[in-house]
Image (spheres, rainbow, N blue to C red):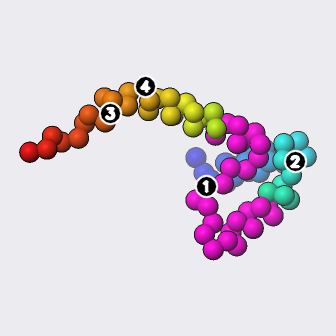
Amino acid sequence: MSRRPLARAALAAGHAMDGLQGGDPAKLADALVHLAGQDEPPLRFIAGADAIEFVESKAKLLLAQVDAHRELSSSLAHDAT
């Protein structure tokens, strides 16, 4: 598939959302400029309260999966000789 139709579709989707998105695009732009100007900008930035809620939920799920098999996972190192 050519990139142009995909780009046009993405642009059209963006225009269709204009004014309907949960956050303020201008505030997001300001936040990104602020972060980019830091001496050590973050590797990841979670933008928006809805995104924070999703990421926190995903993080809790991943931690539960780690805890479910922690002993087995931790037992996989080479035995000391």
Question: Amino acid under label 4?
Answer: Ala
- Among the two numbered marks 4 and 3 on one chain, the one whose residue lies closer to the N terminus: 4
Neighbourhood count class around disc 2 (C-alpha, 10 Å): few under 14, some 14–19, many 20 upward? few
Residue annotated with mark 4: 68
Name the residue tied to disc 1: 44
- Which badge, 2 or 1, comes first in the chain's sequence? 2
Between 15 and 43, the one lying in front of the other is 43
| Relative image position of residue 46 (x, y in whole percent) | 68, 49
Residue bearing mark 3: 73
Q: Amino acid at mark 1?
A: Arg
Which quadrant does the C terminus fall into? top left
Mark nearer the N terminus (2 vs 3): 2
* Of callouts 3 and 1, the N-terminal one: 1
- Secondary structure type for disc 1: loop
**The magenta stretch spans residue 39:** yes
Residues at marks 3 and 1, CA–CA distance in whole angstroms: 27 Å
Callout 2: helix, strand or loop? loop
Q: How far separated are the C-alphas under marks 2 and 3?
A: 47 Å
* Residue holding disc 2: 18
Q: CA distance from mark 4 to mark 2?
A: 43 Å
Task: Please name which of the two marks, 2 or 1, marks the residue nearer to the observer.
Answer: 1
Image side of residue 65 versus residue 27, left or right: left
Q: Residue at x 77, y 61 (%)?
A: 31
